[in-house]
Image: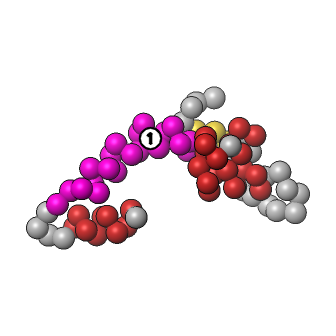
Amino acid sequence: MSRYLYPISDPLMRDIALSGGKGSGLSRLTGLTAVSVPEGMIVTTVAYRELIQPVVRPLLTWEDNSGMAAVIRRAIH
């Protein structure tokens, strides 16, 4: 499987280092019979670090005169 995307039910995704806090928690819930978790995919922490963070980080330090940079920073944090 890809190192960026895994099914939510994959046992590997229970590892918080691979799937992050929310992904790990949802993956653990798939093992409980009393909880219904819809099928889905988890974007891994590797994908975040390699693909998403490089795009988001510059937005956090971007300055402009319209105030839009501050709006984006607040939305992300």
> Magenta: predominant secondary structure element?
helix
Reply above or below: 1 against 44: above
Determine the residue positioned at 64% across, 47% down: 16
Tell which of 15 and 31 is nearer to you: 15
Which image quadrant is residue 72 in?
bottom left
Disc 1 secondary structure class: helix
Reply above or below: 55 against 71: above
Q: Which residue lies furthest to the left in this view?
A: 65
Q: Is residue 49 magenta?
A: yes
Query: Is 61 on the left or on the right of 75, as rendered?
Result: left
Q: Is residue 66 magenta?
A: no
Tell which of 21 and 23 is nearer to you: 21
Tell which of 57 and 3 is nearer to you: 57
Q: Name the residue carrying label 1.
A: 49
- List x then y, in percent, for residue 8: 69, 46
Determine the residue positioned at 40% across, 64% down: 77
Query: Is 22 on the left or on the right of 76, as rendered?
Result: right
- List x then y, in percent, for residue 11: 75, 40
Q: Residue furthest top?
A: 1
Reply above or below: 21 against 14: below
Q: Give the range drawn in magenta.
A: 41-63
Which image quadrant is residue 71 in?
bottom left
Determine the residue positioned at 57% across, 31% down: 3
Determine the residue positioned at 53% across, 42% down: 45
Q: Which residue lies furthest to the right in this view?
A: 33
- List x then y, in percent, for residue 27: 72, 50
Residue 42 in sight in this render: no
Mark 1 closeness class: few <14, some 14–19, many ≥20 residues within 10 Å: few
Residue 29 in sight in this render: yes
At label 1, which amino acid type do we have?
Arg
Of the 4 image quadrants, the one containing the N terminus is top right
